[in-house]
Amino acid sequence: MNTDNNCIPGVHFDKFSKKLNKNLPYDQTINMSEDVVCDGYRAGAQISVFTHFHNDHAWNFKSAMSNSTILLTPITWDAIKALMNLGDRTNIKPTTVGKKYVTPNENEIELLDANHIPGSVQVLVTSKKTGYKTLYSGDFRYPDIQTQHSDCLILDGTHGSPDYDFKSKRKDVLEKIFDTVLKSIESDKSVEILSHRGTMQEIMNFLQKSFDDRIIPEDVPFVSLEKEIRLTNALMPHINPNPDVHHELLEMKDATLNDLHEQRKSYILFTRMQDSQQKFEEKFSEQKDRHVKIIIDSYQYFKGKPEFFEPKKGTYRANYSSHSGFSEIIDYVKQVSPEKVIVDGSRALQETCLRLSQEISKNLNISCHVSEFRNE
């Protein structure tokens, strides 16, 4: 175990977490310095920085909230409040991108845009005593982000495999999503859009804009689960406070969808990509096969295929990835030009992280390894 406190390679398991995989912790806290951690909680850490509101990064927010000063963007804080039903707290410090915060131990923290979902950031910690720089990428999408040189880079490894070596022109994908939704609505069909949180709200926002003098009719309601509606209401004032079209946002219930279906009234259903998708579909089994389905995500089978295609009739796959592809990760590491890289092994497949680490070590000649699990 490397004990270099300038850039601690392990991530701590803390007693408040019940997340275990084969008796090992995952979704772990990222240690940046003796007083700063990211995306989690550590006893004794004065500052906890949260990069964004996805569950695998904000999973231990409440523990951190009672023990640390918390830095995050205003968008992320509004989202977490909505998802966790929290009120304002004096130890929460919403901080804008580019603004610097100095800790009592004279470590300087700067948040950098990560282009992952609304409000997401990279975290740069600089020791004012030594000048040593540690950068945590969090989840990110390169190249449309600011990069900073660091001595140590703690790197997200989600797509750290050549299977994900493809690029996506997001603007083109959005246009294809818009066209497919509008054509479906004009054919009196409803649409289900499956995506992750944050991406879901970006798609909602795009569908509320006029595009080439066309609009999704305002009387077509958006439908989603109550929790996603809370999140949407928190995010939209940040994303677009003045949409071109205002669609009613209805809570997803079988009775509501059945009424719309019986009235032959088209709607757009927003559901979340999740591990429990099968259970979700079983719960709402009455709605099965009623919709044109658009799955918005990035998966390895896009390699060699179009960014938007129809694998089976009535179901489309849209490569609107919120993560960097394999080559983009490598280009990002080159830009940061660190002396060493630590791949976060707790939020991606271990074999994927190992493959990425080997690529960086061999072809970039940078010291690199995957973070170790530590029980304490």
Image (cartoon, grey):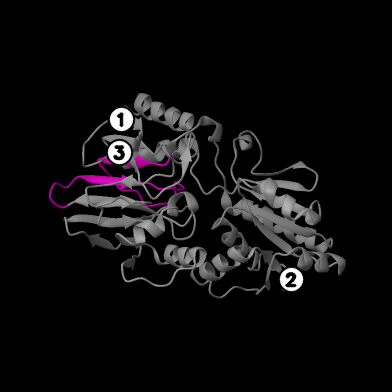
Identify residue for label 3. 337
Please tell me which residue is depicted at 59% across the width and 43% down the height of the picture: 298
Task: Answer with left or right where residue 164 lies relative to residue 290.
Answer: left
Mark nearer the N terminus (2 vs 3): 2
Name the image quarter holding residue 250: bottom right
- The answer to whether any part of residue 215 appears in the image is no
- Pointer 3 local density, CA inside 10 Å: few below 14, some 14–19, many at least 20: some
Of residues 195 and 55, the one nearer the viewer is 55
Residue 196: horizontal and vertical position, in percent? 58, 53
Image height check: is 303 above or below 274? Answer: above
For the residues labelled 2 and 3, the Cα–Cα distance comes to 49 Å
Please tell me which residue is depicted at 59% across the width and 73% down the height of the picture: 243
Look at the numbered disc 3 and give the secondary structure of its residue: loop
Q: Nearer the viewer, mark 3 or mark 1?
A: 1
For the residues labelled 3 and 1, the Cα–Cα distance comes to 9 Å
Identify residue for label 2. 217
| Range drawn in magenta | 128-156
Q: Amino acid at mark 1?
A: Ile
Circles 1 and 2 in contact, beta carbons < 8 Å = no
Image height check: is 164 above or below 279? Answer: above
Task: Answer with left or right where residue 152 lies relative to residue 254.
Answer: left
- The answer to whether any part of residue 297 appears in the image is yes
Image height check: is 239 above or below 341? Answer: below
Mark nearer the N terminus (3 vs 1): 3
Task: Answer with left or right where residue 46 lies relative to residue 175.
Answer: left
Q: Does the magenta run of residues contain 138?
A: yes
